Amino acid sequence: MRWGDVEGARRVLTRVQGLTRDTPGFVFRVDVIHLDGLIAWSERRPERAVELVEQAFAKDPTLIGVGADLAEIYVQLGRADDALAVIARSLEHFPGDERLLRLQAGVGG
């Protein structure tokens, strides 16, 4: 949904955020932050996207895809060193991840 229908993804995300605002133990909180960041990126709000995806990665670097998404954002912003650092940390958790390895090779690591 997030890539095919950004507006739809934003509506669903806003609803989830409203329903879970007062639920501190909501288990998918980091997923919500991650998705919010990806939607911000799609909406061409790179500063907010970086802030949110960095926050998601800091909270749970083992969340599948968050490290690769952050690395891709860094690459697109010309922050190769930051991308390589995130890739290295993510590879500690997902050593054979093809997406991370492709990113690493593409950035020059």
Image (cartoon, rainbow, N blue to C red):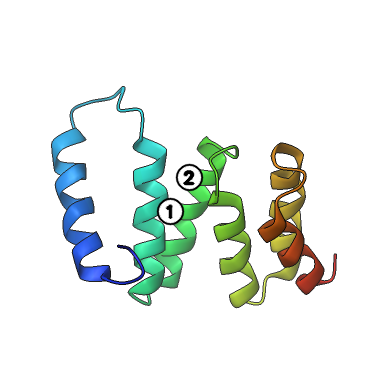
Query: Label 1 sits on what residue type?
Result: Leu
- Residue 39 left/right relative to 105: left
| Residue that appears at 77% across and 43% down | 95
Q: Nearer the viewer, residue 8 or 54?
A: 8
Image mark for residue 105:
none
Image mark for residue 52:
1
| Res. 61 image quadrant | top right
Query: Label 2 sits on what residue type?
Result: Ala
Tell me the crowding category of disc 1: few under 14, some 14 to 19, or many 20 or more residues within 10 angstroms, Cα based.
Answer: many
Q: Nearer the viewer, residue 22 or 38?
A: 38
- Residue 6 left/right relative to 108: left
Q: Position of residue 83 (x, y in %)?
A: 69, 62
Q: Position of residue 22 (x, y in %)?
A: 18, 28
| Res. 58 image quadrant | top right
Q: Nearer the viewer, residue 62 or 86?
A: 62
Looking at the rendered structure, the secondary structure element under dot 1 is: helix
Instruction: Give the quadrant of the N terminus.
Output: bottom left
- How far apart, in angstroms, are the residues tagged by discs 2 and 1? 6 Å
Looking at the rendered structure, the secondary structure element under dot 2 is: helix
Q: Are marks 2 and 1 in contact (CB under 8 Å)?
A: yes
| Residue that appears at 19% across and 43% down | 16
Q: Position of residue 37 (x, y in %)?
A: 40, 58
| Residue that appears at 19% across and 64% down | 8
Check the image and report above or below for 62 versus 87. above
The residue beneath circle 2 is 56
Check the image and report above or below for 58 versus 84. above
